[in-house]
Amino acid sequence: MTQTPEQPITKLEQIEAALGKLAELTFQNATRHDTEIKELIALSKQTTENINNLASEAAQDRQQAAIDRTEFRQQIEQRQSEIRQIWEYLRSGNGESSPPQT
């Protein structure tokens, strides 16, 4: 079986067409992957920013909780002092009373 000059050219054209298609598919995949990677990077940055915001809010909440505890303790101490003063006032008018049990 002998080949005509057109047959090798036809085979070469087929190979070139296949390579062209392969190159196009590879380019499309690379472009799609590039887009997906950029989206993942953006999501990662957003996630990191969200985590940092949450950490900052948690730190502020802890700080506010410490302030609230301090204020609450001060209020308790003030109320206890007021109760002692009232008790002492009542006691001074009625010398036989004993202080409340705490």
Image (cartoon, helix red, strand yellow):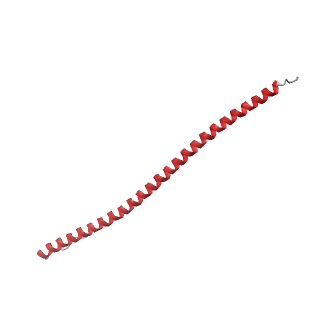
Please state which of residues 55 and 72 is positioned toward the viewer in this rendering.
55
Q: How many marks?
A: 0
Looking at the picture, how far across and down is residue 51, in whole percent? 47, 54
Quarter of the C terminus within the rendering: bottom left
Name the residue: 54% across, 44% down.
39
Compared with 56, 43 (above or below) is above
**On the rendered structure, is 62 left or right of 48?**
left
In this view, the residue farthest toward the right is 1
Location of residue 2 by image quarter: top right
Quarter of the N terminus within the rendering: top right
**On the rendered structure, is 67 left or right of 91?**
right
Location of residue 77 by image quarter: bottom left
Please state which of residues 94 and 34 is positioned toward the viewer in this rendering.
34
Location of residue 31 by image quarter: top right
Looking at the picture, how far across and down is residue 72, in whole percent? 29, 65
Name the residue: 40% across, 57% down.
57
Name the residue: 52% across, 49% down.
44
